[in-house]
Image: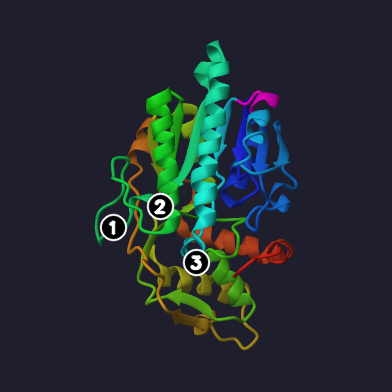
Amino acid sequence: MKNYLVTGGAGFIGSNFVVQAVACGNRVIVLDSLTYAGHRENLDGIRGPGSSELVVGDIRDAKLVPEQLRKYQIEAVVHFAAESHVDRSITGPSAFIETNVNGTYNLLSASLDYWKSLTGAKKDSFRFLQVSTDEVFGALGDTGKFTETTPLAPNSPYSASKASGDLLVRAWHHTYGLPTITTNCSNNYGPRQFPEKLIPHVIQCAITGKPLPVYGKGANVRDWIHVEDHCRGVALALAKGKPGGTYLFGGNAERKNIDVVHEICKHLDRLRPRADKKSYDTQITFVTDRLGHDWRYAIDDALSQRELGFKRTYDFESGLENTIRWYLDHATWVQAVLGKKGTKT
């Protein structure tokens, strides 16, 4: 059993990691401020030989973070907490700077002081893992993939704030020796994702009879990884990754956005047909493209496969169907999270 401090553990990716970590027998302290994208409901019913506990608080709190590290004798900080929606970052970038830059700095500062207080094996085994995104690398053309050596070239306020956090993590390792690891992933999908991201947003709009908005012509390409595969990769990086190292996790499932929307419609036509028997495709509406919309993302995760033993268990087609079924079966969860103050869809 290890004691983990998981920031943002009540959010989409974080809560899926908590489920896996508890199932593996670890004690998980979740630090989450429960903003619009973090929900107590995501931690309900977690069972396993380990345990989880929710601490409601802000990663920028210079008193709270050190207290949790000492109180629970934390052995690894797994940093998922982030503002993560590009559209929100365009209209309100300040929240992204506060959380993704200042929040990461506070966690690093507290973790460094705590790590320095440790001795022997406890000091040697401590890790700070920064969970990041492929968007920090900018955009690809029609060919090529991101690797661990791709230079950072963020194009949105969101990706710039995440890249800033990544650089702070790098600096805290190289300057102070803090044993850090950074992971970058492609687009996640799966259970518990807030319905502002493409896949759950399209599902929710479709079954409520709303237009299915697609930016531009829907030709932008994303690589999709199931959240459970991503979380298994994070756990592997935590267990086997080299301090100061970076590891990428992708889904090997590049799709144009419009093709993803069509596939969602195809599954819904079968799983929950419209009353008028028409296809959900008829609800597709093309809207003005996003400002600075990156053309294509794709990840080469050969290093993670080679050094960590990373393997994907989901192909996109079956993973997408399972995801759609989860949202159809959890209408009360959707209504609960959409009912939060300040929620946008």
Q: Upstream in the sequence, badge 3 or badge 1?
A: 3
97 relative to 259, above or below: above
Say whether marks 2 and 3 touch (CB < 8 Å). no
Q: Give the distance between the C-alpha atoms of the residues marked 3 and 1, in whole angstroms.
A: 24 Å
Residue 140's tag is 1
Q: Secondary structure at mark 2?
A: helix
Asked if residue 67 lies in the magenta stretch, the reply is no
Amino acid bearing label 3: Thr
Q: Upstream in the sequence, badge 2 or badge 1?
A: 1
Task: Identify the image's colour scheme: rainbow, by chain, secondary structure or one colour.
Answer: rainbow
Q: Give the distance between the C-alpha atoms of the residues marked 2 and 1, in whole angstroms.
A: 16 Å
For the magenta stretch, what is the residue range?
A: 69-74
Say whether marks 3 and 1 touch (CB < 8 Å). no
Q: Secondary structure at mark 1?
A: loop
Q: Give the distance between the C-alpha atoms of the residues marked 2 and 3, in whole angstroms.
A: 14 Å
Residue at 71% x, 63% y is: 340
